[in-house]
Amino acid sequence: MKKYAYGVDLGGTTVKIGRFSTDGELVHKYEIPTRKEDSGAFILKDIADSIMKDLTEAGLEKDDLHGIGIDVPGPVHEEAVVNRCVNLGWGVRPVAEEMRKLTGIENVKVANDANAAALGEMWKGGGEGYTDVVMITLGTGVGGGIVLNGKIVGGTFGAAGEVGHMQVNAEETRVCGCGGTGHLEQYCSATGIAYLGTEALKNTDRPSVLREKKNLTAKHVFDAAKQGDEVAVEVAEHVGQVLGRAMASISCVIDPQIYVIGGGVSRAGSYLLNLVSENFKKTAFHASVDTKIVLAKLGNDAGMYGAVKLVLD
């Protein structure tokens, strides 16, 4: 095996690029801007040019490079073709083929960003030591990734792991960003939790420190809940209930060894984990009731780790 490989986490604002040794050590990382003008026409060339430049600056040759793994914010077919990335302006695009032509490197693989993060956490993060992992990312939205037998499960249409769009409330009339209603993302994302907190304040006259916040956030809700604020506790408990029950349903289909929870909301730490675990145990099928639930460890680097793992396998 050659000495190095690159993991590329392609986001809507920046591209995070990591040079890894082939035993999984992150040797060097940096970022470049994501140029989305002209329907993202420059993005892949920018990535290719920056990798070639990094190789040169490190005194390395193409022959030292084992491969390039890329994760993207959209569905991916067969580790090669992106099926629309709205955030990048892309339609259907053969990303692996294009990167091979731009770099001269044959070993190029592509994955959805949430799936790559799940693979990274399985490999070097919260799920290390396990092969069957579901990662749930609680950020602006709710993302998910599935790894079974150490391999990403992308699904026929690239939609496997889209747990944020599970319907958890058939009575909901508010519309999710995807156009559906009652989705997990509407309750357990950072924006969803802020909405629940705002609505809770409207529906009660009870005192709450949350009333002092001009722009209520999920962090405000969980910080106040940890201090025993009644309104905040009720919101946090509702979030834990919705997420725990959703995970119990996921286990009926996938039955992972472990759940890894990441994203900004996961900074609520053990308080959030305890709420989720309690509700998971209440509603899970008895055979999966002891499934582990842990926090992610790799933070914003998870995608890079997962992307490079694709080409090292």
Image (cartoon, rainbow, N blue to C red):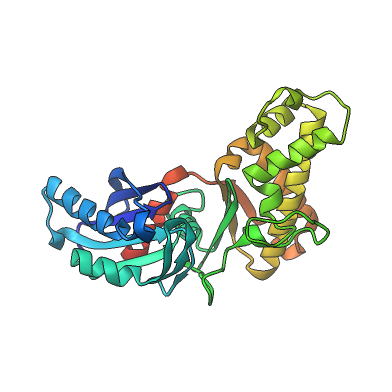
Point 81% across, 37% down: residue: 200
Point 47% across, 54% down: residue: 117
- The residue at the far front in this view is 38
Going by the image, does 73 lie left or right of 4?
A: right
Going by the image, does 79 lie left or right of 205?
A: left
**In which quadrant of the rendered image does the C terminus lie?**
bottom left
Residue placed most toward the observer, 224 or 95: 95
Going by the image, does 74 lie left or right of 310?
A: right
In the rendered image, residue 157, in percent from the top left (x then y), is placed at: 53, 75
- The residue at the far bottom in this view is 156
**In which quadrant of the rendered image does the N terminus lie?**
bottom left
In the rendered image, residue 60, in percent from the top left (x then y), is placed at: 13, 52
In the picture, residue 110 is in which quadrant?
bottom left
Q: Is residue 278 above or below residue 194?
A: below
Residue 313 appears in the rendering: no
Point 21% across, 65% down: residue: 102
In the picture, residue 105 is in which quadrant?
bottom left
Point 44% across, 44% down: residue: 300
Residue placed most toward the observer, 174 or 276: 174
Going by the image, does 174 lie left or right of 7?
A: right
In the rendered image, residue 52, in percent from the top left (x then y), is placed at: 18, 54
Q: Is residue 191 above or below residue 127?
A: above
In the picture, residue 133 is in which quadrant?
bottom right
- The residue at the far right in this view is 205
In the rendered image, residue 252, in percent from the top left (x then y), is placed at: 70, 67
Residue 26 appears in the rendering: yes
Q: Is residue 142 above or below residue 210?
A: below
Q: How many marks?
A: 0
